[in-house]
Image: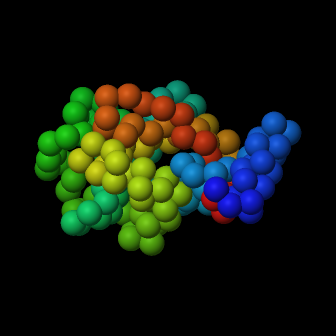
């Protein structure tokens, strides 16, 4: 590990300890999370005062991200083709998909089951700043917290 990289990791740790939301991959940049809610209008799931958006992203042939519902993601093993989840009509803009996959890390997605991840984000309805996300790498580990914030180089 280079001196510069060690320094960046140290800075990220200090920022995290002081409550700053600057992150090292995997994470989701706040701007990408907000954009995801903007493009997912017809896929938003509402529960009380919370709204949720879910998608499936895959790297490889046909790379991209597809909007879906958390219910479908929870009942799908993620390892076999699913015609509803992977419907080309539900693909998000390639630029946003590229940003999301870059945040998470292409290597992390390639290492996931079937080279794809499940992603789900929630926020209070209309709230722009406080977004929480979870990721499932399709490797048997289930849903895990995915930090949302600003990135630093890693």
Identify whether 115 is placed above or below 39: above
Is residue 134 visible in this depiction of the protein?
A: yes
Q: How is the image coloured?
A: rainbow
Q: Residue at x 42, y 44 (%)?
A: 119
Give how far across and how far down residue 94 sits, in percent: 38, 70
Q: Quadrant of residue 49?
A: top right
Left/right placement of residue 26 relative to residue 88 reads right
Identify whether 82 is placed above or below 89: above
Q: Residue at x 54, y 40 (%)?
A: 146
Q: Quadrant of the C terminus?
A: bottom right
Q: Nearer the viewer, residue 3 or 60?
A: 3
Q: Quadrant of residue 17?
A: top right
Left/right placement of residue 36 relative to residue 88 reads right
Q: Residue at x 49, y 62 (%)?
A: 102
Is residue 19 visible in this depiction of the protein?
A: no
Q: Residue at x 20, y 56 (%)?
A: 87
Give how far across and how far down residue 145 sits, in percent: 54, 34
Give how far across and how far down residue 76 sits, in percent: 22, 34
Q: Nearer the viewer, residue 56 or 140?
A: 140
Left/right placement of residue 47 relative to residue 153 reads left
Total numbered badges shown on the rendered structure: 0
Give how far across and how far down residue 117 sits, in percent: 35, 46
Residue extending furthest right? 18
Q: Nearer the viewer, residue 17 or 47?
A: 17
Q: Quadrant of the N terminus?
A: bottom right
């Amino acid at each position: 590990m280079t001196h510069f990289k060690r320094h960046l990791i140290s800075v990220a740790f200090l920022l995290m300890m002081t409550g700053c939301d600057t992150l090292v991959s995997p994470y989701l940049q706040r701007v990408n999370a907000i954009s995801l809610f903007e493009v997912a209008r017809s896929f938003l799931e509402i529960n009380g005062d919370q709204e949720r958006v879910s998608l499936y992203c895959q790297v490889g042939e046909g790379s991209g991200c597809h909007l879906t519902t958390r219910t479908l993601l929870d009942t799908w093993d993620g390892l076999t083709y699913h015609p509803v989840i992977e419907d080309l009509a539900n693909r998000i803009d390639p630029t946003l998909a590229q940003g999301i996959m870059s945040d998470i890390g292409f290597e992390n997605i390639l290492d996931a089951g079937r080279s794809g991840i499940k992603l789900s984000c929630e926020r209070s309805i209309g709230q722009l700043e406080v977004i929480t996300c979870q990721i499932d790498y399709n490797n048997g580990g289930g849903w895990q917290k995915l930090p949302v914030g600003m990135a630093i180089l890693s």
